[in-house]
Amino acid sequence: MMNEEFSKHDISAVITVLKNAVANIFQPLEDGTAVVYHMYNDFHVYDFRLNRSVTEAEAEVCLGLITDWTDKNFMMEITTSKNYDIPEGQSEMSLDVLKHNEWVSEKVNQGWRYGLALDVKEKTDPRLRPYHDLTEKLKNL
């Protein structure tokens, strides 16, 4: 998400750089689209169509490449395949957290990823994040 819109040239360049840096990352739609653009609460949102979830190291590479590419402010959220850590200050996970982590792994393996809104067609879900980061409303969906 960004406050300012990326140019088509910038988007194309980011895709090219990420394709070369992270193997087998993009899964374009049938029409070849690798990025879906939309507005959300006055933010420009770019949904990169990924072929798979990325590792934490790959997420760091993506963040570094985009940070090097632009000086614009942005917020990036990536679904990773790494198991979620126990939140700081807790020594064990509740059954709800374990069930949520299993559900997240299953969804990611089915091609779903984090999104600002639930969209079955696009396979995005705002619940695809660590359980302790969910709002009470999302925990109860």
Image (tube, rainbow, N blue to C red):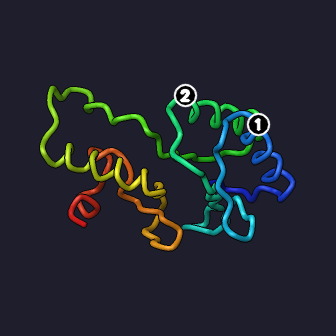
Q: Is residue 23 left or right of residue 131?
A: right
Which residue is at the front of the view, 132 or 22? 22
SS of the residue under disc 2: helix
Q: Residues within 10 Å of mark 2 (few under 14, many from 20)?
A: few
Which residue is at the front of the view, 93 or 3? 93
Q: Is residue 13 left or right of residue 94?
A: right
- The mark nearer the N terminus, 1 or 2, is 1
In front: mark 1 or mark 2?
1
Amino acid of disc 1: Asn
Mark 1 in CB contact with mark 2 (< 8 angstroms): no
Q: Residue at x 29, y 53 (%)?
A: 103
Quarter assignment of residue 127: bottom left
SS of the residue under disc 1: helix
Which residue is outermost to the right?
A: 9
Q: Mark 1 and mark 2: span between their CA atoms? A: 15 Å
Q: At which x and y percent is residue 72?
A: 73, 45
Eyeballing the image, is 13 above or below 28? Answer: above
Q: Which residue is mark 2?
A: 57
Q: Which residue is mark 1?
A: 20
Quarter assignment of residue 2: bottom right
Q: Residue at x 69, y 69 (%)?
A: 30
Q: Residue at x 38, y 56 (%)?
A: 107
